[in-house]
Amino acid sequence: MFFPLFVDLSQKEILIAGAGAVARRRIRTLCGFAGHMTVAAPSVDPAIRELARVYPITVCERKFRPEDLDGKDFVLAATDDGMLNRDIYVMCREKGIPANNCSDKTMCDFQFPSVVKDGDVVIGINASGKNHRLVKETRIRVEKALGVSKGISG
């Protein structure tokens, strides 16, 4: 079970290795919270390009390089290559950088919650990676209770 910890990301550098559907969802969750994000991927989802026009996101249309970790505070390994995600996670551990491996929940220093935001109130919902359906159902119930239209899924 994970402890809910809220972190100020406004001055943090975040690397997202990968730019597909999982990366897109995580980037959307981080928009409005993160100081700056860098996305490294050979192919980039068009929705991520759109987000980069509005939010502080640098898009590097190329494969991940180990030097991409330099100066980063958090890393999301969200490529479609499980071995690469594992390697990124291991490199982050060696450098003391908290990382999330989207393809292996046992290789995550943190997890992404489903997020409901209502003004200054931010609610994170998580089931320790065990029941995504329950998290979604809970998010919808919380949204209805608060009268907000849509949360931000992690």
Image (tube, rainbow, N blue to C red):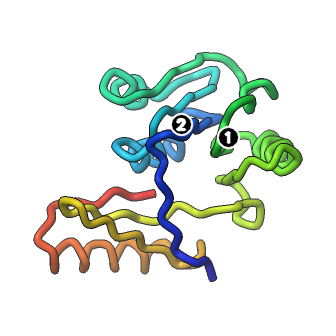
For the point 15% across and 65% down, which residue is it?
Answer: 148
Mark 2 packing: few (<14 Cα in 10 Å), some, or many (20+)? some
Can you say whether 82 is above or below 145 in the image? above
Position of 14 with respect to 94 (left or right) is left
Name the residue tied to disc 2.
20
- Which of disc 1 and disc 2 is earlier in sequence? 2
Where residue 26 appears, x then y in whole percent?
A: 48, 48
Mark 1 packing: few (<14 Cα in 10 Å), some, or many (20+)? some
Amino acid on which the number 1 mark rests in the picture: Asp
Quarter of image, res 152? bottom left
Where residue 2 appears, x then y in whole percent?
A: 61, 77
For the point 41% across and 23% down, which residue is it?
Answer: 49
Element under label 1?
loop
Where residue 4 appears, x then y in whole percent?
A: 52, 74
Can you say whether 134 is above or below 31 in the image? below
18 and 58: which one is in front?
A: 58
Where residue 21 appears, x then y in whole percent?
A: 49, 42
- Whether the residues at callouts 2 and 1 have beta carbons within 8 Å, the answer is yes
19 and 107: which one is in front?
A: 107
Name the residue tied to disc 1.
80
For the point 57% across and 36% down, which residue is it?
Answer: 13
For the point 53% across and 47% down, which residue is it?
Answer: 22
Quarter of image, res 38? top right
Amino acid on which the number 2 mark rests in the picture: Gly
